[in-house]
């Protein structure tokens, strides 16, 4: 099936990393940028593959995960629209430490390493933006480790639901949709699927939420937040 022609310069200009660049710089990046379309369940790269650039997600979702010899899977990160991944590995000139799989039909933009290095040498604003993005990723990973180490399974799940919720009135009910399957979310929170389901059941029994598949209704965000502590 044919796809509409993408306006790659326009898409790049919308990415936080590139918003400060001039039109000429955007055009330079776009010349070496390629689109990558994945169907749900398709693998983008395997652990150990060489990294020659990095990716932006235009639409869809990408799962970054590890697999053990026993076949168990640990989800490291779920990447959604307007997010990027692969920058750190690209700089280290090492193979990917994880595999990447599409959780939904996805459109990505692939930016070549050579183009990034050229911009780093000529544009300090771009260098600062890239460092800021990598720093945010590092802080997020540190927060994850802290959450897994210091917080109970109940606190992890509540914290995740609070992140999904965004209501002006904290006492209002909020309808949330899990961005992916419960199994993937559980792995992302470093929980077993059984533990994740048990916590959702306990929150339902406490009258804080209702669960219908991926749809979760939070009756009162403030009560849920206070229940966390």
Image (spheres, grey):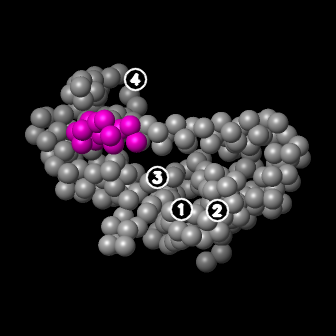
Foreground tag (4 vs 1):
1
C-alpha separation, residue under disc 1 versus residue under disc 2: 8 Å
Foreground tag (3 vs 1):
1
Relative to residue 93, is residue 22 depicted above or below? Answer: above
C-alpha separation, residue under disc 4 versus residue under disc 2: 44 Å
**Horizontal side, residue 185 vs residue 83: left or right:** left
Foreground tag (3 vs 2):
2
Q: Secondary structure at mark 1?
A: loop
**Horizontal side, residue 104 vs residue 15: left or right:** left
Tell me whether circle 1 and circle 2 mark residues in contact (CB < 8 Å): yes
Tell me whether circle 4 and circle 1 mark residues in contact (CB < 8 Å): no
Lower position in the chain sequence, tag 4 or tag 3: 3
Residue drawn at x 30%, y 59% is 183
Lower position in the chain sequence, tag 3 or tag 2: 3
C-alpha separation, residue under disc 3 versus residue under disc 1: 12 Å
Residue drawn at x 61%, y 77% is 1
Residue drawn at x 80%, y 52% is 117
Please tell me which residue lies in front, 93 or 222: 93
C-alpha separation, residue under disc 3 versus residue under disc 2: 19 Å
C-alpha separation, residue under disc 4 versus residue under disc 1: 40 Å
Magenta range is 145-157
Residue drawn at x 23%, y 50% is 196
Q: Secondary structure at mark 4?
A: loop
Relative to residue 204, is residue 50 depicted above or below? Answer: below
Relative to residue 58, is residue 150 depicted above or below? Answer: above
Circle 4 residue? 168
Q: Is residue 193 visible?
A: yes
Relative to residue 59, is residue 22 depicted above or below? Answer: above
Which circle marks residue 77 in the picture?
A: 3
């Amino acid at each position: 099936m044919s796809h509409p022609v993408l306006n790659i310069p326009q898409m790049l200009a919308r990415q936080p990393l590139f918003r400060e660049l001039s039109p000429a710089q955007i055009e330079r990046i776009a010349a070496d940028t390629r689109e990558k379309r994945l169907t749900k369940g398709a693998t983008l790269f395997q652990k150990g593959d060489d990294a020659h650039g990095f990716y932006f997600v235009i639409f869809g979702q990408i799962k970054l995960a590890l697999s053990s010899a026993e076949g168990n899977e640990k989800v490291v990160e779920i990447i959604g629209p307007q997010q990027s991944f692969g920058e750190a590995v690209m700089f280290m000139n090492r193979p990917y430490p994880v595999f990447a799989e599409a959780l939904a039909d996805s459109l990505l933009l692939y930016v070549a390493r050579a183009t990034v290095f050229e911009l780093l040498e000529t544009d300090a604003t771009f260098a600062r933006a890239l460092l800021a993005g990598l720093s945010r990723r590092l802080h997020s990973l540190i927060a994850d480790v802290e959450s897994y180490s210091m917080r109970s399974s109940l606190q992890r799940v509540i914290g995740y639901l609070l992140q999904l919720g965004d209501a002006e009135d904290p006492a209002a009910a909020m309808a949330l949709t899990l961005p992916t399957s419960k199994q993937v979310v559980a792995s992302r929170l470093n929980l077993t699927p059984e533990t994740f389901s048990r916590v959702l059941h306990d929150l339902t029994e406490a009258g804080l939420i209702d669960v219908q598949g991926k749809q979760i209704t939070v009756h009162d965000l403030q009560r849920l937040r206070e229940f966390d502590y």
